[in-house]
Image: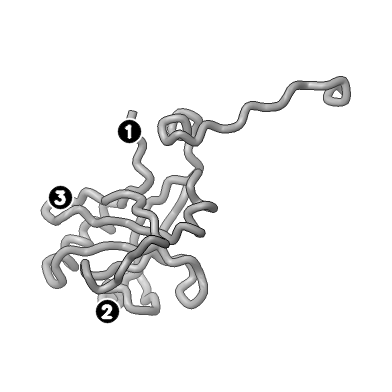
Amino acid sequence: MTTDRVAVTPAAGELLRSLAARHGPLMFHQSGGCCDGSSPMCYPVGMFTTGSGDVLLGALEVEGIDPVEVYMSKSQFEYWKYTHLTIGVVDGRGAGFSVEVPEGKRFLTRSRMFDDAELADLGLVPAAPGPRTSADVG
């Protein structure tokens, strides 16, 4: 089993194809809050510089374009490492420098907790419960 940390909805994939046709290869950096909330920010490759403080979550496979890498800061990853992220798109203008803004669309991230099999595959096996004591029996 190979567990992916990120996925893309079909509608977001369509928008990525359109954006890649105009801007070339793309990448995402998952915002950590502040001005744009927690929106995934989409940039042409090379326009946003990642560094040692960022974690590569994975690459979105969208037919017809180069894989779209998705990054997040290490500190934010510590909070989100137990979740699967799906990048979707909705109508409405976001703020910031993400390339979809002029389209009247904005990317958004939805999350769900990994199940036990996925956690095990990622090496994040949930901690086993401690031994039961007489205080646990009521």
Which of the labelled discs sits on residue 2, or is there none?
Answer: 1
| Helix, strand or loop under label 2 | helix
Placement of the C terminus among the 4 image quadrants = top right
Q: How is the image coloured?
A: one colour
Query: In which quarter of the view is residue 50 placed?
Result: bottom left
Quarter-wise, where is residue 45 in the image? bottom left
Three-letter code for the amino acid on which mark 1 is drawn: Thr
Label 2 sits on residue: 102
Marks 3 and 2 sit apart, C-alpha to C-alpha, by 23 Å
Is residue 89 shown above or below 34? above
Q: Earlier in the sequence, mark 1 or mark 3?
A: 1
Badge 1 marks a residue whose secondary structure is loop
* Label 1 vs 2, first from the N-terminus: 1
Looking at the rendered structure, the kind of residue marked 2 is Pro
Q: Residue at x 50, y 69 (%)?
A: 33
Q: Nearer the viewer, mark 1 or mark 2?
A: 1
Q: Which residue is mark 3?
A: 63
Amino acid identity at mark 3: Glu
Where is residue 64? Give x, y as percent. 11, 53
Query: Which one is earlier in the sequence, the residue at label 3 or at label 2?
Result: 3
